[in-house]
Image (spheres, grey):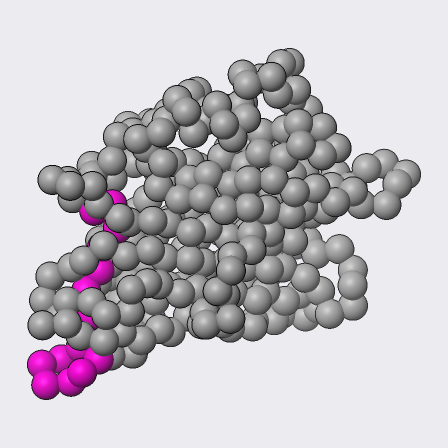
Amino acid sequence: MRARGRTRRSVRTVAAIGIAASLCFAGWATAATELVQKGNLRVSFRGTLRPKKLPRQGTAPITVRVGGRIFTTDEADPPGLTQIAIAINRRARLDPAARPSCTYGQIQPSTTAYARRVCAGARVGEGTFSASVAIPEQAPYPSQGTVTAFNGTAGGRPVIFLHIYGTEPLPTSFTLPLRMSRGSGQFGTVLTGQLPSVDAHVGFVTGIALELDGGSRPGRRPYLAAGCPAPKGFPGAIFPLTRAEFHFADGRNLLSTLVESCTARE
């Protein structure tokens, strides 16, 4: 099948690249980091936000980065990642109505350039990925490419579409919907992605990450905004920024919570 934007699509390679993404950003050195482990399986989860100076009352636009790297202590292939759920602090407000909406059919399959052109107004984040693609009777093949996040709808409900595009070993696109739901307690919004089941010989997850840009346009609400939960009289606060749950095909689940800080702006 030939995808829009002159992309050939291989179901086998789509699955491998789509679930074996690792995103790197400059500036991760200042991010909050937590390492969690169960048996030989480890997940290194990172997250940060900017700016750190936020209103004590109300909200202001923010950008959030989150990323996880999956690996093992004995260099064995990790089990397949089946689901990831990212919960965001309840003081952060994610507003899908603040941006135009894109549909799955508009961007899958397609190149990054095509997807960004047809859904330009719905674009809410981006990054890059590197992948380990398993090829029968050969060593894993390294692949790199781009990740673009779009505000969208699926089944009448708001989602964030992660459009992943790679060029090696074949031009391939894959789109992962992150479905939105209400959180509880300290977390207000949960983004959940169900990854496709694949043969262990096709590929395995090494990492997944995302940068969401909440910047607003003149006269429009921001897509992502937050306030600093500092009590009156305190200059700032320490708070749980995000919580991530990683579910694997072998039944293991790993949970990681990242703590951030902010300075209150009157």
| 188 with respect to 204 (left or right) | left
Q: Nearer the viewer, residue 96 or 36?
A: 96
Q: Nearer the viewer, residue 80 or 57?
A: 57
Residue at horizontal 54%, vertical 26%?
A: 111
| 216 with respect to 26 (left or right) | left
Look at the magenta stretch and give its main secondary structure.
loop
Quadrant in which the C terminus appears? bottom left
Is residue 255 visible to us here? no
Residue at horizontal 68%, vertical 24%?
A: 10
Q: Position of residue 126 (x, y in %)?
A: 45, 44
Quadrant in which the N terminus appears? top right
Q: Position of residue 128 (x, y in %)?
A: 55, 46
| 194 with respect to 231 (left or right) | right
| 243 with respect to 56 (left or right) | right
Q: Which residues are magenta?
A: 222-236
Is residue 57 visible to us here? yes
Residue at horizontal 58%, vertical 29%?
A: 173
Residue 228 lies in magenta, yes or no? yes
Total count of labels = 0
Q: Residue furthest top?
A: 1
Residue 31 lies in magenta, yes or no? no
